[in-house]
Amino acid sequence: MTSDLHMMTATEATRRIQAGTLRTEALMEACLARIAAREPEVHAFAWFDADTARRGLAKAPAGPLHGIPLGVKDVLDTADMPSQYGSPIWAGWQPRADSAPVAWARAAGAVVMGKTVTTEFATRKPGPTANPAGLGHTPGGSSSGSAAGVADGFFPVAYGTQTAGSIIRPAAYCGVVGYKPTFGTIERMGMKVMSGSLDTVGVIARSVADCALVASAIAFRDLGNPDTKPDRAPLVGICMSPTAANALPETEALRVRVTNALGRAGARVSDRELPDPFAALIEAHPIVMNHESARALGWELQNAAEGLSEGLRERLDFGLSRSPAAVEAAYDVFARTQAMFPEAMDGLDILITPSAPGEAPNGLEWTGDPSFNFIWTSLHVPCITVPAGLGPNGMPLGIQIVGRRGEDKAVLAWAQWVASAIGN
């Protein structure tokens, strides 16, 4: 059992630590041994030091996350580790303070293992991280190192952030669980924010219950125990719109397989497409995201533009070149569709939708297509991906569970019900 400690869920580790049957030092050393063996191939870390992790454990207070190793995406500031945001502009930068998510995780007893690789400012140029399920495949992005590290046993839980699909897609590609909470659930202070209207801090983990455990502790909310079985099956809408055309054959086959499995488990399943006005988010999301990102990177554009990748500069130029009327219209699409979404879900508990167009693409130069993610990020609603088998090349697939804004506790519970119904 000791050799498998690095793959233990956070909830199981917490239960055993509290019961006195697992030493936090044993869990830490198992994770460090796994990192030593696999990091040269996976490249999940932007910054890592084993002795710093051990010192963090030595001073970890008692709390709901006591002794739990945590990966921190390198757009969240840390007072004792560099925060470089995936950009050479910020190489070696050392903040004076922890970001709020890191500070509250440490206060709850979690131990920061290191800073995980992010794409450039969590938006464009990929880092070196490989997918543990197939090292020639992307782990997704922008939370690349967090997803890969959880999947490969470096730590049981990690922080990710999402502006389009940066939690859900990498978690799905790496075969783990990703939770993007309702917008604003987890405080962002101390994050290198790129899009004030979109950026959301979330959790990547090995189980739905792990996500609830961490988010509850740091957001000071009761998100329940998703492992508690509901007293009924859910009312489920299968939703592919408005980007259904992007689904690859493996995702269409997954839709059929999941629909049948949910029906056999007792769910009432029906098709539920989003009304036509939601298609306007396809154009509105990149306008808002890139307009806000360009404004957020004002210092970098004015003082260190040569350190920005060509791809990022193109997107920032796109954002700055949108007319005030176009930007205002995009914000109006956000407001209208957010207001319409509860009615679009009328009579349902959750929507089921793809986590990604298909399995992780081959190569590390592209982190994949967020076309099944940005809609929900724009709507500010909670969404969770759970593992759902393998694609044609043996890479993981995920299925996404979406609910109403603010109903995270219920969505987490239904996500675990779905995971159990499809065999996880």
Image (spheres, rainbow, N blue to C red):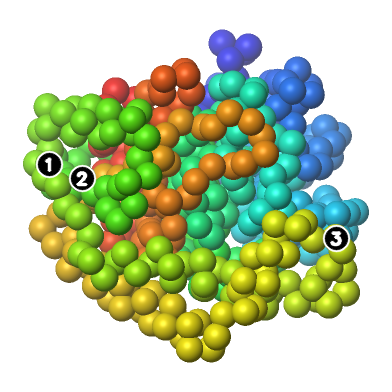
Q: What amino acid type should be assigned to the residue bearing mark 2?
A: Ile
Q: Could you tell me which quadrant the C terminus lies in?
A: top left
Q: Could you tell me which quadrant the N terminus lies in?
A: top right
Q: Residue, x 53% and y 60% (percent of image)?
A: 163
Q: Residue 14: percent from the left, percent from the top?
A: 52, 34
Instruction: Work out how far the residue at label 2 is from the one at label 1, CA to CA, in angstroms.
Output: 7 Å
Q: Residue 36: percent from the left, percent from the top?
A: 78, 22
Q: Is mark 2 on a helix, strand or loop?
A: strand
Judging by the rendered image, the residue that carries numbered circle 2 is 238
Nearer to the camera, 65 or 71: 71
Check residue 269 in the rendering and tell me which mark sits there, or answer none: 1
Query: Can residue 338 be seen in the rendering of this structure?
Result: yes
Earlier along the polypeptide chain: callout 2 or callout 3? Answer: 2
Nearer to the camera, 318 or 302: 318
Q: Residue 29: percent from the left, percent from the top?
A: 73, 23
Check residue 307 in the rendering and tell me which mark sits there, or answer none: 3
Query: Can residue 78 be seen in the rendering of this structure?
Result: no
Q: In which quarter of the image is residue 414?
A: top left
Q: What amino acid type should be assigned to the residue bearing mark 3?
A: Gly
Relative horizontal placement of residue 246, taking residue 236 as reference (left or right): right
Labels 2 & 1 near each other (Cβ < 8 A) = yes
Q: Is mark 3 on a helix, strand or loop?
A: helix
Labels 3 & 1 near each other (Cβ < 8 A) = no
Q: Residue 322: percent from the left, percent from the top?
A: 57, 80
Position of 410 relative to 7 (above/below): below
